[in-house]
């Protein structure tokens, strides 16, 4: 009997190591997930103890009919598309360049990864100041170049606001792709290249049969990180345009926050969050599926 | 033939460096411009277009620190960063040690549950976190801000440390056990000190993300508890015309990050590549 008791005690002390992590996990992951799910069927103003009303699927139905919501999703998709193409192309180009050079690799790595370590708020405020319509450095330079006719308040003009935000986002983000792609390139076994050179392989066939196939998993990782990071863009928006002018730079997170604190409608905010989560999941899975197909061909 | 080849090679190399230098300038210039503007006066900031200010008005920093309240925000940010990191390091290392070395029921299930949540993004989670914090009575409380962030850092840290502990030689623990150490002592005196390099990566990554966090702080904390990121936007909203002081506040926010980054850049870049390529 004492032996059995001892073994139980032993197992329990083993388990005790994970208790702190598990408690937090249950509160902030499992409970919040279930709570979010339940909330999405209710109408509730966020006051603890306040009345809530069961809505069924009405919140979801309202999300589907909410034009501003879908335009905010569209804005996030637009910025994501630009980041996936322009930003990652730049990252790849830089990685290929830095991979080739011998001296200064570390210096370039440190510099290119500087914007990603800064906060979205600080980065947004810096560029807000540079893009300022009245006192901004960009307009000053354009005036010096006699391009007065295109000067404008870049972040307040409906024509340019979303692209200015996308530019800032890409400026902040390309270092991620660069560092990961460079590591991928440097991970490729040099012997593969040497062997193919002995067989007289051209630059193109080396790229086609060695570099590209080995880099595909890395491209997938970079793409998924880009998608997840860009779709959830928020800090840059709140420190530059705050969704304006009008609704021109609204993104899903700003809309969810508006439902919470603007409309006091937590059920609706939860439904938006879940719909948005599903969109992200579909996009990520689609990306993985697409790249697997590409790999087989 | 050879010399011509060499010359072409030289020219490509120069071209490559020129391109890389251009991009570097685009990366660094905005930051220098911010620092430069933080040293101009309320009058010169609107018409002094030189990167090197005509005179250095360090007064802005003193005013921002005191009058702009950035001193308070700074200490708040330091406090949150330290507390979250302490929580993450201890909770994750204990859990990772147990997942790697100790036996208990449901071990694998729990481990994959932790790691699984790392992969699935729940973009609306802050709605529910806000509600839960409210229900727990932790609204406008430092713990309401610290605990969710500890939780947020755990999966990655547990994953990293478990991989590390899995590779750690068993003999070290065996000999400690012979010397009469119990498992808490082995964890504390043997495993934890050995994991220093993995812990360094965890500390740096989480320090960056806590220092830069905005949304949760905005939702949960009240005025005098705000960290720097929220303080910056509050300052900008209330004193829109005081650009030099705002720039000084931004520089105060950025400097610790830059120092940590420059000192630890090796770990940071290693951490990303290890995380991305192996994970």
Image: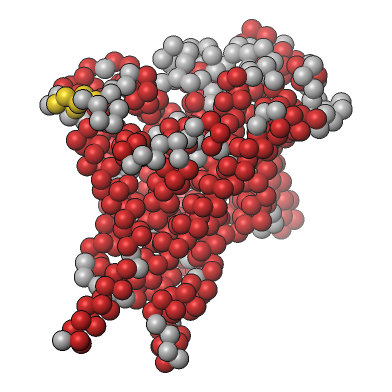
Q: How far across and down, in percent of the image, does residue A165 sit?
A: 51, 25
Check the image and tell me how it is coloured. secondary structure
- Is B193 on the left or on the right of B157, as rendered? right
Q: Quadrant of the N terminus of chain A?
A: bottom left
Which of the 4 image quarters holds residue A114?
top right
In percent of width and height, residue B95 lies at 36, 65
Of residues B266 and A174, the one nearer the viewer is B266
Residue ranking furthest to the right: B55
Residue for point 26% across, 77% down: A9
Q: Is residue A65 visible in this depiction of the protein?
A: yes
Residue B29, position as x, y percentages in the image:
70, 34
Which is nearer the eye, B180 or A86? B180
Q: Give the image location of residue B17, x and y in percent.
A: 69, 46
Residue at coordinates 41% horizontally, 73% vertically from top-left?
B165
> What residue appears at the point 68 percent right and 43 percent down from the top-left corner?
B255
Out of B145 and A216, give the one closest to the viewer: B145
Q: Is residue A161 left or right of residue B170?
A: right
For image coordinates 34% across by 71% down, the residue present is B98
Residue B229, quarter of the rendered image: top right
Is A244 above or below relative to B40? above
Q: Is residue A293 visible?
A: no
Instruction: Give the total number of marks visible in the rendering.
Output: 0
Q: Residue furthest top?
A: A149
């Amino acid at each position: 009997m004492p032996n059995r008791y001892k073994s139980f005690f032993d197992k329990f002390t083993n388990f005790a190591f994970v208790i702190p992590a598990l408690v937090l996990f249950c509160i902030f992951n499992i409970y919040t997930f279930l709570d979010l799910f339940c909330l999405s069927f209710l109408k509730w103003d966020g006051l603890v103890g306040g009345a809530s009303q069961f809505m069924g699927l009405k919140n979801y139905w309202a999300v589907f009919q909410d034009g501003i919501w879908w335009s905010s999703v569209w804005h996030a998709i637009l910025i994501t598309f630009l980041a996936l193409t322009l930003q990652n192309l730049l990252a790849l180009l830089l990685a290929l360049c830095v991979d080739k050079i011998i001296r200064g690799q570390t210096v370039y790595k440190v510099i290119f990864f500087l914007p990603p370590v800064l906060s979205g708020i600080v980065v947004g405020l810096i560029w807000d100041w540079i893009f300022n319509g009245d006192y901004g450095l960009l307009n000053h330079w354009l005036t010096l170049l006699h391009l007065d006719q295109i000067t404008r308040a870049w972040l307040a003009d409906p024509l340019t606001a979303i692209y200015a935000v996308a530019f800032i986002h890409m400026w902040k983000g390309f270092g991620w792709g660069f560092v990961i792609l460079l590591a991928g390139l440097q991970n490729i076994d040099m012997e593969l290249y040497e062997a193919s050179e002995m067989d007289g392989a051209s630059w193109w066939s080396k790229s086609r049969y060695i570099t590209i196939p080995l880099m595909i998993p890395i491209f997938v990782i970079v793409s998924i990180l880009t998608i997840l990071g860009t779709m959830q863009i928020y800090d840059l928006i709140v420190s530059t345009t705050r969704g304006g002018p009008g609704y021109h730079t609204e993104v899903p997170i700003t809309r969810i926050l508006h439902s919470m604190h603007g409309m006091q409608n937590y059920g609706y905010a939860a439904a938006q969050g879940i719909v948005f989560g599903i969109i992200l999941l579909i996009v990520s899975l689609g990306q993985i599926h697409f790249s697997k197909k590409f790999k087989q061909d | 033939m050879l010399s011509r080849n060499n010359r072409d090679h030289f020219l490509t190399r120069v071209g490559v460096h020129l391109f890389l230098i251009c991009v570097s300038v685009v990366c660094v210039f905005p930051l220098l411009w911010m620092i430069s503007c933080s040293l101009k006066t309320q009058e010169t900031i609107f018409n002094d277009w030189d990167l090197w200010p005509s005179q250095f008005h360090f007064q802005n920093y003193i005013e921002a620190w005191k009058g702009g309240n950035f001193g308070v925000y700074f200490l708040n940010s330091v406090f949150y960063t330290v507390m979250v990191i302490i929580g993450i390091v201890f909770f994750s290392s204990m859990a990772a040690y147990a997942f790697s070395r100790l036996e208990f029921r449901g071990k694998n299930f729990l481990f994959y549950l932790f790691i699984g949540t790392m992969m699935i993004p729940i973009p609306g989670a802050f709605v529910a976190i806000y509600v839960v914090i409210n229900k727990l009575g932790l609204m406008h409380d430092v713990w309401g801000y610290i605990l969710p962030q500890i939780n947020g850092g755990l999966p990655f840290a547990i994953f990293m440390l478990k991989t590390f502990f899995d590779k750690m030689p068993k003999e070290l623990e065996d000999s400690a056990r012979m010397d009469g150490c119990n498992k808490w002592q082995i964890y504390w005196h043997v495993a934890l000190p050995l994991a220093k390099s993995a812990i360094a990566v965890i500390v740096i990554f989480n320090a960056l993300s806590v220092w830069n966090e905005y949304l949760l702080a905005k939702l949960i904390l009240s005025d005098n508890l705000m960290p720097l990121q929220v303080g910056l936007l509050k300052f900008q909203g209330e004193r829109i015309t005081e650009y030099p002081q705002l720039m000084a506040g931004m520089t105060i926010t950025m400097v610790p990050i830059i120092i940590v980054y420059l000192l630890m850049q090796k770990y940071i870049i290693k951490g990303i590549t290890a995380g991305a390529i192996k994970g």
